[in-house]
Image (spheres, grey):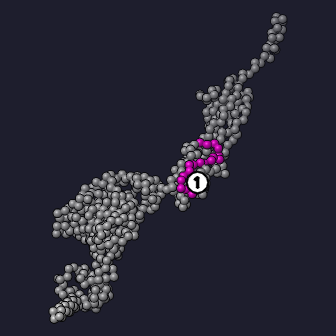
Amino acid sequence: MLRMDTKRTKSGFSAYFLLAVFATTYLLLPLWPTNSLAGEWVYTVQEGDNLWDLTRKYMVSMRFWRRLQKLNQITTPRRIPPGTRLRMPTAWSKINPAGAKILALRGEAEITDGRSLAKRKARLGEQLKEHDRLATHPGSNLLLEFADGSRLLLTAGSELEFQKLQAYGDGDITDTRIKMKRGRARNRVNPGKKRGTRFEITTPSALSAVRGTGFRVSADASGDISRVEVAKGSVQVSSKSITRTLSGGFGIVTRTGKPPSQPVKLLPPPDLTGVPALFETIPFAFRFPPLHGAGGYRVQIAHRGNLDLLYFDELFRKASISVIDTNIPDGKYQLRIRGVDKLGLEGIDAILPIEINARPSPPFQVTPEAGASLTDPGPSFKWAHTEQTSAYHFQLATNTRFDQPLLDRPDLESEQFSPEQQLKPGIYYWRVTALDLEGKAGPAGTPQQFTITPKAPGTEPPILDEQGVTFHWRPGEPGQHYRFQVSTNPDFSNPLADIETDESRYRLPKPQPGTYYMRVKGITADGIEGPFGAPQRIEVTPPKEDISWVVLTVPLIMVLVLLL
């Protein structure tokens, strides 16, 4: 009994002792030396900040305001000068988890849970947390957005781990640390320029601490070589206790176990002046002038914007590009091309806004055929059926620009059209555009030329008199002239006459007896020649001999003989 009471007394004493130690520790925690704290972050004072508001916002307790004052040697806690950098120990700070959201995804990616190590397929809009791992499959890429608005574009065949995703206070200041095991990423960091935000990416051979807003980082599959390229701002790259600062327009290469190389100036952007801004077929190809010092070119097609989802991402050896990915949908894009130097560093982007409008494909235009010559002034137009279309847009013009079309019918449902109006002789162009089921027009068909030629003039019977033969034909359109041929051969070889005339008649003087062939065709004022009309034939017979002189002469001779 006594022993049991003794145990209770000891147990009660131990409990009271531990409670007293905990309370003392809690009360004395703000008075502990600074060097006992494991880490800290930096806050830059803004206009109107005071020590009490900052403690309330970022510290776990108001008890820490005096310790913050002592740590940072603040003499005027009510009015701290703007721009002052305050050390904020993480052990005293309000720390909240901050995730990373999959903002856009093309293709497939895999997430490995940081706790259970279970794998799952990445989905659009999904939130990733600290210690999760993310890997993109070949041909895939995804866009991440962090709590501070930073974005990271992870390209195909890449893998990274979120080592730290934290936010301080109400989340306006974040601490993001990422380990990239392999692949390539393009980053736009802290677009709101919030002071105190931290963003670091480590590779197997280097650590990159970001102060700027735009940079790229890559790690070879072997992990031996890493590259950092800065477009804007500055990045600190550390390896083997050596830190180098890269400013915009420079890159650096690091190798495992070696200090980082000296900064290298990145290649300038290629000249894309001659690259078209509209592509109406897929696949499509284009060229641009080679860039001095480039051993290759990175070509990307993304939605318009800085770091939007990539629809195309390929490396080419020459400045001759072929985009063969037929899965790129129609739309407005940003074409980004940069040279790659001998170290593998990718240069400054050349950016060109482009549009792809390749669907639905224009139908094959059947008749009139290209280059056809027609005498019928009311031709019918026919084209092939196109799948997934709601209508066709037919146009007829006298030039390939179609800026002033003679006919413009945007709502034809049939694959043929017969205009009511008659066409004058001349050169014409026609094309057909297909509209998809939502009414969106695809690329216009290729302008197809045909010619309406003047009909052969109607001929009148020739008039034969003692002086020759006169050929007549009916006049054509005003301003029209004619080509007339007459020959003794039905094939009109070696014609007796082959002339152009403005008159609708021709006279052949004193033809020799024989068979003659004639034909005529019209020519417009623009020089368009119609077909020859059907040849006509005329027989010229020798004149009958006049024997009246014989009748008169013979009696006269007989009279003269008798008289003699």
56 on left or right of 25? right
Residue beneath label 1, please? 394
Q: Residue at x 64, y 44 (%)?
A: 376
- Placement of the N terminus among the 4 image quadrants: bottom left
318 on left or right of 430? left
Give percent across and percent down for residue 284: 42, 52
Magenta stretch: residue 433 in it?
no
Q: Nearer the viewer, residue 39 or 5?
A: 5
* Count of picture labels: 1
Q: Nearer the viewer, residue 516 or 20?
A: 20
Q: Residue at x 19, y 64 (%)?
A: 260
Residue 44 shows in this picture = no
Using a 10 Å C-alpha cutoff, classify the residue at mark 1 as few (fewer than 14 neighbours), some (14 to 19) or many (20 or more).
many
Q: Residue furthest front?
A: 1
- Placement of the C terminus among the 4 image quadrants: top right
Give percent across and percent down for residue 510: 69, 27
**Is residue 311 positioned above or below 73 on the image?**
above
Q: Secondary structure at mark 1?
A: strand
Give percent across and percent down for residue 281: 46, 53
The magenta region covers 373-390
Dominant secondary structure (helix, strand or loop) of the stretch shown in magenta: loop
Q: Quadrant of residue 277?
A: bottom left
Q: Quadrant of residue 106?
A: bottom left
Magenta stretch: residue 382 in it?
yes
Residue 436 shows in this picture = yes
